[in-house]
Amino acid sequence: MYHLKHIALVLGVVFFSRLCIDTRGWLINDLALGFTCLPFNKTYYINNKPYNLPLEERYSFINGVHKLWVFSTDEPLYRGSQTKPRSELSINGYKYSTGVWQFEAHVFVPYGTSGVSLMQVFGASYPHASTLMVRVYNGDLYYYREKVIVHDIYNKWFRLNVIHNVECNSVKVYINGILKFKGHGRGGTTHYFKCGVYAQDRDSFYMESQWKNIKIFKKSK
């Protein structure tokens, strides 16, 4: 009888462990261990958008979901800028130069959005402007244009975590709690996170992303 109970206990532990892995991000946010979650609201970000349009024509916040969209024919951030159109949350209320920082959010990208940066770790050494860009091309997530992070992300919510270790000069990208990319940083003295849509090469006519449960973490000392 003891032997059967022992087997049942082991199977139960294995099943629960597997459950935690399969539903990571919903039951256990293990990536937050050792981090402090910082307050996040409107006072911690600004909206970047085409300079000639009111905010509500490229951004909405309904039922906890930030929706950002832009057209390839839109104007840039400011008059005379050579950058492409964007609609972004620029989380510059949390600028940092040292330490380990983490961005977390659930993301939804509709079918057809392509050639666009969804999320950035802004700040780097010249000639670069950013330490990390997570882009989407034809339904696949990329590190810039160089490496596929994960395939087939259209029309589904997924959890995105990005961890930037300044001193170790490293960035990591997790999808639904699983490490999908690890790379080097690009230097720089000041960094902050951005998310939304920022047109890049071969951008689609319409670009959109939706974000909820946005969190900013700092590694506890």
Image (cartoon, rainbow, N blue to C red):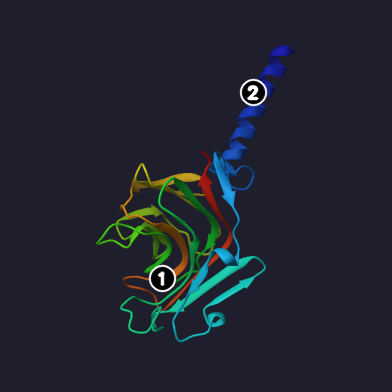
Q: Residue at x 64, y 34 (%)?
A: 16
Among the 4 quarters of the image, the one containing residue 191: bottom left
Toward the bottom, the furthest residue is: 52
Q: Residues within 10 Å of mark 2 (few under 14, many from 20)?
A: few
In the depicted view, which residue is nearer to us: 10 or 160? Answer: 160
Image-based side of 201 in relation to 136, left or right: left
The amino acid at mark 1 is Tyr
Image x and y of residue 136, in percent: 40, 63
Image x and y of residue 1, in percent: 75, 13
Toward the right, the furthest residue is: 1
Image x and y of residue 215, in percent: 56, 55
| Residue named by callout 2 | 10
Q: Earlier in the sequence, mark 2 or mark 1?
A: 2
Image-based side of 192 in relation to 13, left or right: left
Residue 198, labelled with which disc? Answer: 1
Q: Is residue 159 visible?
A: no
Among the 4 quarters of the image, the one containing residue 67: bottom right
Q: Is residue 128 visible?
A: yes
Residue 171 vs 117, above or below: the answer is above
In the depicted view, which residue is nearer to us: 4 or 158? Answer: 158
The amino acid at mark 2 is Val
Image x and y of residue 43, in percent: 58, 66
Residue 139 vs 60, above or below: the answer is above
Q: Residue at x 72, y 18 (%)?
A: 5
Q: Residues within 10 Å of mark 1 (few under 14, many from 20)?
A: many
